[in-house]
Amino acid sequence: MSLISLMGALEIGLIFALVALGVLISFRILNFPDLTADGSFPLGGAVAAIMIAGGQSPWLACAAAMLAGAAAGWVTAWLNVRLNILQLLASILVMIALYSINLRVMGAPNVALIGSPTVFSPLIGEVSERAMWVQPGVLAAIVVAAKLLLDAYFASQSGLAMRATGANPRMARAQGISTNRAILTGMALSNALIALGGALYVQTQGGADISMGVGTIVVGLAAVIIGETLIPSRSLWVITLATVLGAILYRLFIALALSADFIGLQAQDLNLVTAVLVGLALVLPTLKAKLRKTVKGNPA
């Protein structure tokens, strides 16, 4: 695999690390099966693309994308806690609605950003060769900041209440915690991070496309599971670190598989490779548990 391919995989992995952190909040911390990600990721990209194309600051576009993603997550949670719609069904409804909303936002199936300023532009300047190093560096700084802020939040009273809501809602309510508020806040935070990933993605790819969100939730889940398998821990700061590393490793695995000439895979095999890697990620925890039992049952 060439250096360009390696840095490109690292770049995409860092973007999807934000997605994975969002998925971690909904699936692991809140225990809320959420498919909104497949709609909020392109929503963040659409909002950012249309604002940047309109001459707005890329950082302001990222902030607006996060607000839009937070609104989408909040609506999913509201459908569940206020209208008693099943969690999975509520997220599917919002995901379907977001397809039309994204088209409305962009006004077309895609929006080009080639030549437009991005959050990376000030550091790249006129030397385009710098992009290979600058973009992963800026993305790494954003991911680290997001991880540290999440760690600090979940150590706060509000964050601990959210964690208690996901772990045992009945006990949380008995302790006076507003579980509905915790779910609304958590889902908004989750999809805000996912939308931020979408906003950064369109700036690295040179445009937004209506289909860019397909499979987002699968990638996010795979990153979480890979991270949990490689670095098992009960400490939240370790879990968030493992999630970030899982997202990066996931993209590196895909890049390696597609660049391995002896395997014979091509770009059109991306979904096949994704399905295989996700399947392995789902099976690994079970295999690991069986191996641990076998070792304990047959001591040397």
Image (cartoon, rainbow, N blue to C red):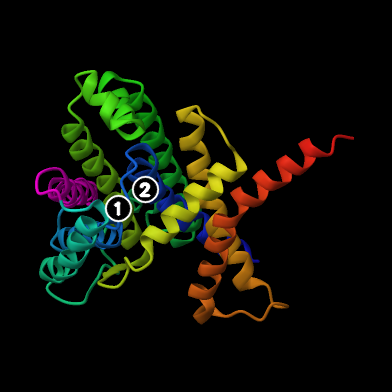
Q: Nearer the viewer, residue 53 or 197?
A: 197
Q: In what quadrant of the picture does the N terminus appear?
A: bottom right
User: How many C-alpha atoms fall within 10 Å of the one at disc 1: few (<14), some, or many (≥20)?
Assistant: many
Between disc 2 and disc 1, the foreground one is: 1
Q: Is residue 70 magenta?
A: yes
Q: Quadrant of residue 89?
A: bottom left
Q: Residue at x 16, y 33 (%)?
A: 181
Q: Position of residue 167 (x, y in %)?
A: 36, 32
List the single residue furthest toward the right: 300
Residue type for callout 1: Asp
Q: In the rendered structure, find residue 23 and report the number of the disc placed on it.
A: 2
Q: Is residue 63 magenta?
A: yes
Q: What secondary structure predominates along the stretch shown in magenta? A: helix
Indicate the quadrant containing the C terminus: top left, top right, bottom left or bottom right.
top right
Left-right relation of 201 to 221: left
Secondary structure state at the residue bearing disc 1: loop
Expressed as whole percent of the image width and height from the top left, the position of residue 3 reads 61, 61
Circle 2/circle 1 CB separation < 8 Å: yes
Reading the image, the residue beneath label 1 is 34
Where is residue 266? Give x, y as percent: 57, 80
Q: Is residue 47 left or right of residue 193?
A: left
Residue type at tag 2: Val
Residue span colored magenta: 58-84
